[in-house]
């Protein structure tokens, strides 16, 4: 079975739950449907924002990796020059 428990739902969406003629709690499915649709919209916006942020971070990481590689090469070149200078002394 898949569903929600009216008592639990009542804590979150009190207007979506009512007591039926039989004394049992009932759920107004239409209100829950629209709440879910709005939640999906919000999650979609968050997903787009996070995707854009990840893309930006990926580009930044790529640039930093290139810079790091260039600095490593420069450092190796300096070490070679230093060793040559030390041999001459």
Image (cartoon, rainbow, N blue to C red):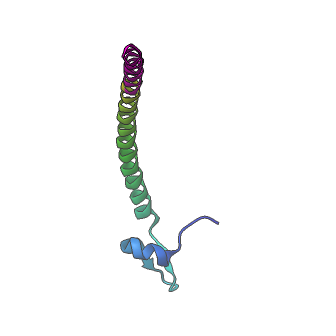
Q: Is residue 55 above or below residue 85?
A: below
Q: Residue at x 60, y 64 (%)?
A: 2
Q: Which residue is at a point 44% across and 68% down the rendered structure image?
A: 28
Give the main secondary structure, helix, strand or loop, of the magenta stretch: helix
The spot of residue 77 in percent (x, y) is 39, 17
Quarter assignment of residue 78: top left
User: Residue 79, how many percent across, how many down?
Assistant: 40, 21
Using the image as rendered, state which of residue 26 and residue 56 is in the foreground.
Answer: 56
Q: Which residues are magenta?
A: 68-89
Total marks in image = 0
- Look at the image and say whether residue 50 sits in the magenta stretch: no
The quadrant holding residue 18 is bottom left
Relative image position of residue 27 (x, y in whole percent): 47, 71
- For the C terminus, the image quarter is top left
Quadrant of the image for the N terminus?
bottom right
Residue 37's place in the image compared with 78, above or below, is below
Q: Is residue 53 left or right of residue 23?
A: left
Pick the front one: 64 or 59:
64
Residue in the picture at 48% in, 79% down: 7
Q: In the orientation shown, which residue stands out farthest toward the front? A: 89
Confirm whether the magenta stretch covers residue 75. yes
């Amino acid at each position: 079975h898949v569903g929600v428990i009216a008592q639990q739902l009542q804590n979150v969406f009190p207007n979506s739950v009512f007591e039926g003629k039989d004394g049992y709690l009932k759920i107004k499915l239409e209100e829950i449907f629209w709440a879910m649709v709005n939640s999906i919209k919000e999650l979609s916006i968050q997903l787009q924002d996070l995707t854009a942020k990840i893309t930006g971070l990926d580009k930044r990481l790529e640039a930093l990796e290139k810079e790091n590689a260039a600095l490593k090469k420069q450092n190796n070149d300096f070490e070679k020059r230093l060793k040559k200078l030390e041999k001459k002394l």
